[in-house]
Amino acid sequence: MNNSALPNNTVFCIICHQAVSYGDATAGSLYADNTQAFACNAHIAERVRWTLAWIAFDVDQHLVRERTAQKSGQAS
Amino acid sequence: MKHIAAQQQFYVDVRHYAQKDELSYDLSQHLPRRLAVGPIMVVADNPAIFLSVIRKRLARMQAEIEREHARTLNRHKKMGFIRELVRLNTACFTTKSQTLIARPDVLFTAPHTLAGRQLPCQTIYIATAVSGRQLHAVLRMLVPGGLVVIYGEWQTQYAAVITALNGMMKG
């Protein structure tokens, strides 16, 4: 899930998977489609959880990019 | 994110802290997430000292990632940990904009050196008080869709700078 499905002024937290307001979120890395991903501000205090969740997110997006590249390679 | 600039040109995140320690902790947690996005600038009073503090914190983070890497058998998790360690180990952190490397990944700089600089950045951390003019110089280096993180209180003069800059971008 990314932010396009959410109401205005809310974003999806990639750590707790909840919709949060911009005021309670911070921008991190990018989705595979180069749109901005966010997480709740509160999670930054959870040192290990914050890092591990973002690393897992980055791997998922890397795999999505690879699959997309493979598909477009096959199509052409 | 405390403020989102009009036209979605960039994101502004105002982050509060009680002690300098909290600032360096917050920045060292956040910065690795932006490393993959693109070049980063950190504006601080004492760039060399601040860089050394951040390096220490990142070294501790790397040790934690290595521990997690050793603990898991999951192939995807291992891949993620290795990618993160490689990114942290190969990123160029410096206080000098003129280095042998064409473009550092993370440049630590003092506010008074901002005028006249043209270094497009995806992320800019402002870890010290800056004037309206300095903020203007910073924001002009931010690429569309970029993020500026301001540590401390939101200054009323900042809103005017952002409004003026948005007007320039629209025009």
Image (spheres, coloured by chain):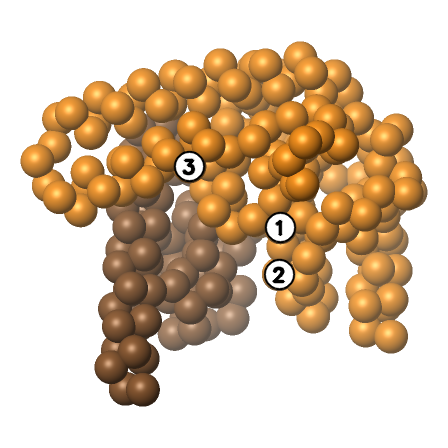
Chain colours: A brown, B orange
For discs 2 and 1, the disc positioned in front in the rendered view: 1
Residue reaching furthest to the left: B73
Q: Check disc 3: other Cα within 10 Å, few if <14, some if 14-19, many if 20+.
A: some
What amino acid type should be assigned to the residue bearing mark 3? Answer: Arg
Report the Cα–Cα distance between label 2 and label 3. Answer: 22 Å
Q: Are marks 2 and 1 in contact (CB under 8 Å)?
A: yes
Q: Report which quarter residue B89 is drawn in.
A: top left
| Chain of the residue displaying label 2 | B
Q: Residues within 10 Å of mark 2 (few under 14, many from 20)?
A: few
> Which residue has dot 1 on it?
B122
Which image quadrant: the C terminus of chain B?
bottom right
Q: Residue at x 35, y 44 (%)?
A: A54
Q: Amino acid at mark 1?
A: Gln
Query: What residue does disc 3 label?
Result: B87
Q: Is there any visible trace of residue B109 in the rendered image?
A: yes
Seen from the viewer's position, the closer of residues A3 and B77 is B77
Q: Secondary structure at mark 2?
A: strand
| Residue linked to disc 2 | B145
Q: Provide residue B64's location: percent of width, then percent of height.
A: 29, 22
| Dot placed on the residue nearer the N-terminal end, 2 or 1 | 1
* Placement of A70 over or under B91, stated as above or below: below
- The kind of residue on which mark 2 rests is Gly
Name which residue lies at 42% across and 46% down.
A40
Output the chain of dot 3. B
Name the N-terminal-most of marks 1 and 3: 3
- Residue B112 appears at what percent x and percent y? 88, 29
**Residue nearer the viewer, B85 or B8:** B85
Q: Chain of mark 1?
A: B
Foreground pick, A31 / A42: A31
The answer to whether tags 2 and 3 share a subunit is yes
